[in-house]
Each structure stands twice: as C-alpha cells, then as structure tokens.
C-alpha cells in the first residue's frame, strides 16, 4: 500500500447496535485515534436506520448527513424558543444536510430502512466540506486540496467514498474499492500537484470529504 493513501474497508468495520434498537452504526474513522463520542475532533460513519425516532444530541459538534440508500427520511426540526419548527425530506443523490449537534430532530422513515453517511466535526477545531462527484468512465482527482478557497496555513485531509465498486490508479498502482470503502489521502504541504485516476464500469457517484483544522 502506498504510504500516501489509506483504505478503510467498510466490510471490516464493526457494526454497533444502538441502545434503543432503532439502528446500527459502522464507524469508519474517528480522530484522535482511540477517541470516544464525548471527545473526538472529527468522525466519519455510516448508519443503518430502521425505525423512527430522535437524533442523538452532540453538543459542540457540527454535523453533515447524506442519504445513501432507501427512499429517504422526513426530519422534523425544532426551531426557536417560540416553539416554531420546520420539516424537510432528505433523499439519496441530494446535497448533504448540515446542522448543529445540539439541534433537536425527530426522524420518520419514508420506507422501511435507510443507510446514511455522517461527518461530524468539533466546532472551533475542524470544518468539513462534502461534495458528490459523478463518475462514468475515467476521471482524475487532485490529491492536494487546492480548492477555490483562500489559501491557509493548514492542509485539508481528503477522503473519498465510492457508492459502487471502482478502480483507482495512483502512482502507477491499481487499487480496487468496494462500495462504501473509505479512501484517505495523506495530507502534505508545499508539493507539486498529484492526481488519482478513478475508473468506473458503470455510472456511479463518489462522496468527497475535505476536513480542515481551523488553526495551523
């Protein structure tokens, strides 16, 4: 394995059942390594939700949520102190829903079950950006996150999550990713641009996550 990349295999991640029995979660990554839900800086996971119920509260955490499989979910979001609330529906192929971990949310499934993708970052320490990338054939992705954002003294950490099996070629080596395997690209500063080639035999999507520290 090239030291500049790391693969976290979805099938090898342990599934943890929720205490209320309403679903289960596969934690793909948590940082710092060995952190718990009370003290992590960022966390990436995939959850299976099989019943209606409230979201868990995560104080001091910013969250982003994408639906991967299933019809979708209806969210009732508690509003301000006057008791006003709103409802939204999340479905596959849509942009991520961003919200604070303190928000009180009740979820209602549109069908029997959904699979969702979650990115959590500790507010004030890290920020995250999520985008969906269409892939049909061959595309290239720059491994260094030289985005349109203003330059900073920090380097973003990039992750790629394919929604279907896909092949990657990096520095002449071929890697096969299965659905929901997480590819982490090691961050490096002040080096020339390098590219990861992605090859798909079918039209699919990848979810790209860029996580950046708010301070150098």
Image (spheres, grey):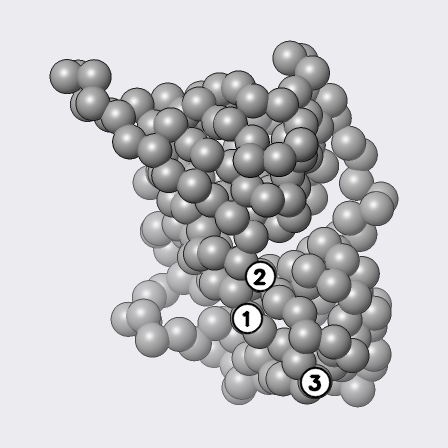
Residue found farthest to the top: 20
Among the 4 quarters of the image, the one containing residue 166: bottom right
- Disc 3 packing (10 Å; few <14; some 14–19; many ≥20): few
Q: Is residue 80 above or below residue 30?
A: above
Between the residue at mark 1 and the residue at mark 3, the CA separation in whole angstroms equals 12 Å
The circle drawn on residue 133 is 1
Quarter of the rendering occupied by the C terminus: bottom left
Determine whether label 3 and label 2 are within 8 Å by CB.
no
Looking at the image, residue 120 lies above or below residue 106: below
Residue at disc 1, secondary structure: strand
What's the distance in space between the residues labelled 2 and 1, CA to CA? 6 Å
Structural crowding at the residue carrying mark 2, measured as other residues with C-alpha within 10 Å and reported as few (<14), some (14–19) or many (≥20): some
Report if the CB atoms under discs 2 and 1 are less than 8 Å apart: yes
Q: Is residue 90 left or right of residue 47?
A: left
Circle 3 SS class: strand
Which of discs 3 and 2 lies nearer the camera? The answer is: 3
Q: Residue at x 67, y 34 (%)?
A: 113
Per the image, the residue denoted by label 2 is 207
| Residue 137 numbered mark, or none | 3
Classify the position of the N terminus by image quarter: bottom right
Q: Earlier in the sequence, mark 2 or mark 1?
A: 1
Q: How far apart are the two marked residues, 3 and 2, measured between alpha carbons?
A: 16 Å
Seen as rendered, the residue at the extreme front is: 111
Q: Position of residue 78 (x, y in %)?
A: 30, 23
User: Which residue, as the protein is rendered here, is positioned at the far left?
Assistant: 82
- Which residue is nearer to you in this view: 163 or 203? 203
Upstream in sequence: badge 3 or badge 2: 3
In which quarter of the view is residue 146 placed? Answer: bottom left
Quick check: 157 left or right of 15? left
């Amino acid at each position: 394995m090239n030291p500049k990349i790391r693969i976290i295999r979805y099938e090898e991640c342990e599934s943890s059942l929720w205490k209320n029995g309403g679903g289960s979660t596969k934690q793909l990554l948590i940082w710092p390594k060995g952190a718990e839900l009370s003290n992590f800086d960022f966390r990436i996971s995939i959850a299976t939700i099989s019943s209606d119920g409230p979201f868990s509260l995560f104080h001091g955490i910013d969250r982003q949520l994408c639906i991967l499989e299933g019809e979708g979910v209806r969210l009732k979001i508690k509003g301000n102190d006057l008791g006003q609330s709103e409802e939204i529906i999340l479905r596959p192929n849509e942009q991520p829903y961003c919200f604070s971990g303190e928000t009180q949310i009740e979820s209602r499934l549109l069908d029997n079950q959904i699979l969702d993708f979650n990115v959590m970052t500790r507010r004030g320490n890290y920020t995250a950006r999520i985008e969906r990338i269409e892939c049909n054939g061959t595309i290239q992705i720059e491994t260094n996150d030289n985005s349109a954002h203003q330059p900073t003294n920090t380097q973003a950490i990039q992750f790629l999550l394919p929604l279907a099996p896909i092949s990657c070629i990096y520095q002449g080596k071929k890697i096969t990713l299965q659905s929901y395997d997480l590819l982490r690209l090691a961050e490096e500063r002040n080096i020339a641009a390098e590219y990861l080639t992605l090859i798909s035999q079918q039209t699919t999507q990848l979810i790209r996550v860029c996580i950046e520290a708010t301070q150098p």
